[in-house]
């Protein structure tokens, strides 16, 4: 039995999820990493202090897998305090050609997957309250070519977050989301290496001029997961280095000399 706050982190073996685990543990918590395969979980655990985290194989597209993983938290750690829904994929496809199956699977991973975990977490919070942080994206806020399924899924996460916040607030459960801009993780590294993402115009369109490091997203998720944000509920917090507020259409200049 643990006396430390326990966070269940989907997609916890990599990227933003693993960075959140680091942050959570450094602040005194215990992390349960939930991800698709035991090999990547084992590799992730080697980066965390011994005894501070556990891995559980979990596919968020499978209700039984999610329920079993959350049950294991109650059996092993004895309590659940926080969930980070960070499991996700990126798969750019042209909207004229995308199959029903491909579109549906993107929604299944991101939206229904998050819902499965939220529902199981609600049971596990067992009337003691808790916090949930879902992971949306700046893709929820704008149209992005070849990202119809991803933008639809990420926009839906905002609606899911708001509704659960309203339904569960009186039970002491806060539900919020983060909407990261571009983050340096395997997800973007693979797209860049496959020629499906060009980081140069993105950096040019981002006021801070760079991608985020995963830790810079994790620290904001940590804020939403902990009492520092005790009156924030149903909110999607944009963490994008100024990408979505940038109205300078001449990114090669600072805009000051333009009419
Ligand atoms: P990542 O690829 O580094 O990590 C994602 C993890 O999710 C992987 O370990 C993967 O195995 C896991 N995963 C995928 N499908 C799963 C499933 N069905 N069940 C359980 N685990 C599964 O990616 P990341 O950049 O850390 O992305 C995390 C989240 O942040 C995703 O939801 C992504 O859409 C979102 N996001 C990422 C960026 C970015 O630029 N990297 C920007 C905005 C939002």
Image: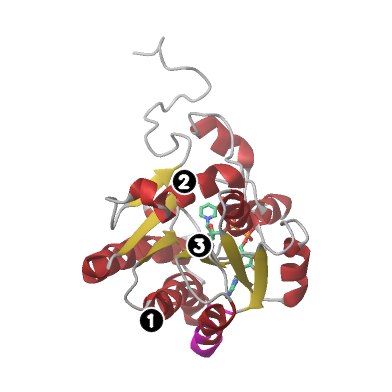
Asked if labels 3 and 2 touch by Cβ distance under 8 angstroms, the answer is: no
Image height of 236 relative to 174, above or below:
above
Nearer to us: label 2 or label 3: 3
Residue on which the image places disc 1: 123
- Which numbered dot is residue 66? none
**Residue 172 percent across, percent down from the top left:** 28, 65
**Residue 254 percent across, percent down from the top left:** 46, 17
Residue on which the image places disc 2: 220
* Secondary structure of residue under mark 3: loop
Residue at (63%, 72%) from the top-left corner? 35
* Secondary structure of residue under mark 1: helix
Question: Does the magenta-highlighted stretch encompass residue 66?
Answer: yes
Residue at (59%, 39%) from the top-left corner? 211
Task: Calculate the distance from the C-alpha at mark 2 to the C-alpha at mark 1.
Answer: 25 Å
Nearer to us: label 2 or label 1: 1
Q: Which residues are magenta?
A: 59-67
Image height of 140 relative to 255, above or below:
below
Task: Calculate the distance from the C-alpha at mark 2 to the C-alpha at mark 3.
Answer: 17 Å
Image-quarter location of ligand 1: bottom right
Task: Calculate the distance from the C-alpha at mark 3 to the C-alpha at mark 1.
Answer: 17 Å
For this orientation, the residue located farthest to the bottom is: 64
User: Does the image show residue 56?
Assistant: yes
Upstream in the sequence, badge 3 or badge 1? 3
Residue on which the image places disc 3: 5
For label 2, the crowd category at 10 Å Cα-Cα, with few meaning under 14, some 14 to 19 and many 20 or more, is some
Quadrant of the drawing holding the C terminus: top left
């Amino acid at each position: 039995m643990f006396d430390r706050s326990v966070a269940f982190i989907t997609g916890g073996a990599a990227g933003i999820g693993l960075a959140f685990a680091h942050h959570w543990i450094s602040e005194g918590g215990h992390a349960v990493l939930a991800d698709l395969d035991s090999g990547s979980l084992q590799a992730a655990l080697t980066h965390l202090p011994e005894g501070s985290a556990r891995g559980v194989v979990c596919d968020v597209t499978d209700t039984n897998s999610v329920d079993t993983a959350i049950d294991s938290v109650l059996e092993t750690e004895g309590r659940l305090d926080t969930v980070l829904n960070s499991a996700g994929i990126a798969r750019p496809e042209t909207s004229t050609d995308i199959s029903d199956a491909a579109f549906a699977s993107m929604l299944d991973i991101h939206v229904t997957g998050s819902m499965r975990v939220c529902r199981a977490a609600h049971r596990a919070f067992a009337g003691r309250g808790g916090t949930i942080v879902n992971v949306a994206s700046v893709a929820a806020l704008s149209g992005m070519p070849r990202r119809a399924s991803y933008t639809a899924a990420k926009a839906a996460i905002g609606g899911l977050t708001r509704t659960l916040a309203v339904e569960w607030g009186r039970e002491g459960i806060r539900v919020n989301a983060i909407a990261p801009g571009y983050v340096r993780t395997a997800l973007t590294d693979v797209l860049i290496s496959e020629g499906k993402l060009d980081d140069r115009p993105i950096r040019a369109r981002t006021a801070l001029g760079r991608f985020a490091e995963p830790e810079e997203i994790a620290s904001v998720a940590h804020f939403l997961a902990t009492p520092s944000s005790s009156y924030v509920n149903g909110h999607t917090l944009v963490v994008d280095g100024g990408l979505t507020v940038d109205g300078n259409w001449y990114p090669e200049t600072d805009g000051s000399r333009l009419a």
